Amino acid sequence: MKSNYFTIQQNSRGAITGLRLNDDSTNMNWVIDPNYLKSLNYQDEDKLFGEFHITVNGHPYRSIDQTPIIHKTNDQSQLTFAFDNVKVSETFELVNDRLKWQIQLENTGSNPITINDFGIWISLAYVMFRDKDVYRNANQSAAVFPSISPNYTKLAAVRRDNTAPNLGVYQIGGEVLSVGTYNEYTNRFFENVSPSLDGMLFHEFVLAGGYSDDQRPHHDWIYPQTAINLSANQARSWDFVLQSYTDQADFYHVAQQLGHPYIQFEPLVQADQKQTIRISPAANQQVATIKVRSQQTLEEDLTADFTNGSLNYQPKGLGEHELIVTFTDGTTDIGVFNVMASISKLLCDRADYLCDHSYTGKSGKIPYSFSPVSNQGESIGKMTFILQECLLDASISDSAQKIQEVETSAVNYVRPKWFVDGDFKHPRKLYGDFYRVMDLEYIAHLFYLLSKCPADALKLHTPKEYLAWAAEVFDVRVNPDLHDNQRGKEEAQMLGVYFMYIEDLLKDVKMAGLDKEYSEISQAWQTATERVEKNSPQLLAAMTEHFFDNAGFGPAAAALALTHHQSGAKIYGELLKANIGFSNDFRSQSPDRWWEALSYMIHSLWGGVTAAAAQITGEQLGDVALVQAAYRATNAVLYMYDANATATDRKLQPGEAASTYSIAGPNLNRPDLSRNRFGQSIFASDGGIFARLFPDGYTGEDDWDMGEELVAYLNGFGQTTYLYADVNGNYQAINGAVKKHADNHYEVTSFAPYIHRYIDLDTGKQFNSTSLTVNFDTNKQLFSQL
């Protein structure tokens, strides 16, 4: 099929195998290509765009096992599948700048039937190609961000280099229950190849059920799992439109043209804050009712408070809240936001929990460690978090004792474990015949934060000694001349999470007169960032052990921004914008990543590090969209520590945490993990590579690599609120709220738990204050105390 806007290819079964936008000079195929699957021996013909699976009266069927009747013209094709007393029809039609897709389900028998499950594949080009041409992965692949709604579901397929055009999928008829994914992948980690991980996600619209047997989320009260009952000769239909768009704003503009409302709200509200909801109906659309429900409270009707397109209200109860907006035509749209008692309480609870439950002390199985332990440096992130929290929160209980427990662990567990005879110049080979240079940046951070602690809170060494330790370890981390093996020399030159503290470390090392370390570290930092800047047009930093990885381009963007390499920072900043989701559900606004969950997911560590990279890059470049994306991502990551969450099977006690959340519902690789929190070792029972990665099986210790992302939060949104002028000249806050006064003044209120900075992104001006509310003069473009 072909029109002035689209060129569509279909296989002999009618499944869409090629979908191209005619004005796209890159000729990107926006759907998964069976030829690529065949080239890697992936057996997924049953998941191509338009194929489906359906369960009727308990009997499962797959479209791939049937031969459809196909009628085609130049601009339309119709596929008809016949099962026992059931007919499924799909119609694809090119109309102007749109591809319309209608699905019809009909009971052709004389008795009622039940559709227990009905999922239809919309396999957009979410592919991590097994190709060292990074440009292919950046330009010919898309992240897919779902906004699930009964009547207004949307998918935003965002090209990974954030260039246009992009592709949107919009529901215009019928009822959608959810969006699921299936992950196909190959991980050759143990084959000594690099990169070693490639794969893809196949997406499906869930139109009925979604799960079989008991493999389902049992506490997901937001997204239904209902069956469809059809009486004799009854039919049900669903309609979607695929249309190109340019950017996030245009995605919602196109949606409104297609009849979707535009609903905005804060993704996270603390208990002492009000939620602001803004609703812009589409043309000829009128709001009938506005309600909010949560597990802890009765449904609240807020309709009477809605005036001039918005309402403010005080949420009741904690945990996930579902906003339900019904229109006079009977259709419904939803939004999902979170309510916490306070972020500061969450952080204090976490520090208490780690010291009370994680610290093993002298008599522990592994003395003085904070469990769960690992050979990987990420596992000591929980210790850096405790220190940073104690340094920021004067009200934290037993602060000195907490610092001393971390200090004792750093001296008696960390140092002898990672270094031969405690010699920082000789990292211990904890991985058989090699050591991992990346581990050292976490250890250096730990020692550096000990150097920031009050001297009277330390018992074993002085702050100056810990600063010297940090400098020596960090020098080994970044200086290839300090390694006698090729692997060490290469890894030393790679960027990492150390972008979050290197500038502060360098200042303190210089002030302390540690001239040799300062010279070597600053030279290595300069050499690394200059190399990454030089190679930024080729996007080389985006490739790690994964063929395309936010753990590569996130740190690259932030490192270049901090060192004023603006050209490269802008290039990698665009990858960050495309990587961080936008959705009607705060959990779906996470940085895009799939390996640790085998589905679109929240990953606490790399989600938080990516958010920090976006925040730092956005602040340095004055890029509002990047800071907004960072804030969306941060609120998703905090869900991994939320003990008041009600819509997941994995409940957390105050202070507990879990590293991973599977956003997809269902996660077809592991339906039991759908919309649930867990640690990656839970996949050990799947066998294969997971059995080798996790030889001890599922330990139940879901937080082994968590902590560094909270340090990033504490040094970022934990202390900072941003202000900017929107396209209409009105000022808006990120991580805060504004109240406009008639005399060109705004009151700016921060949501940060430990506010220290207000920053005007338009001018770069910074105002240091610990006041929760300050004044902003739009004429002078200056902050001041109230």
Image (cartoon, rainbow, N blue to C red):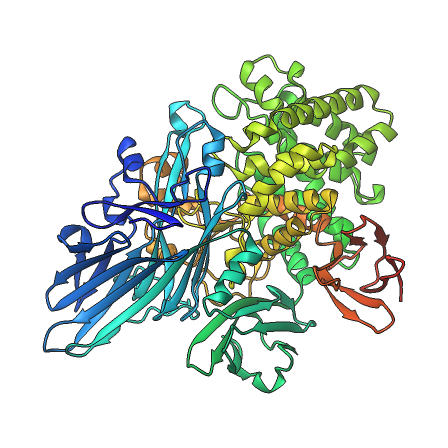
| Res. 340 visible in picture | yes
Between 41 and 294, the residue placed more toward the observer is 41
Q: Quadrant of residue 650?
A: bottom left
Q: Residue at x 25, y 53 (%)?
A: 51
Residue at left 59%, top 63%?
A: 267
The answer to whether one can see residue 363 in this image is no
Residue under the point 44% across and 61% down: 154
Quarter of the image where the C terminus is located = bottom right
The reply, left or right, for residue 753 in relation to residue 142 is right
Measured from the top left, where is residue 382 in percent x and y? Answer: 62, 45
Q: Position of residue 168 (x, y in %)?
A: 45, 55
Instruction: Give the total of numbered labels.
Output: 0
Residue lying farthest to the top in this orientation: 484
Q: Position of residue 495 (x, y in %)?
A: 62, 30
210 or 684: which is nearer to us? 210
Query: In the picture provided, is 666 more to the left or to the right than 662?
Result: left
Residue at 49% across, 19% down: 433
Figure check: 132 above or below 317: above
Nearest the viewer among 297 and 22 is 22
In the image, residue 650 sits, relative to residue 455, either above or below, namely below
Q: Is residue 458 above or below residue 89?
A: above
As drawn, the residue found furthest toward the bottom would be 304
Residue 527: x percent and y percent? 69, 21
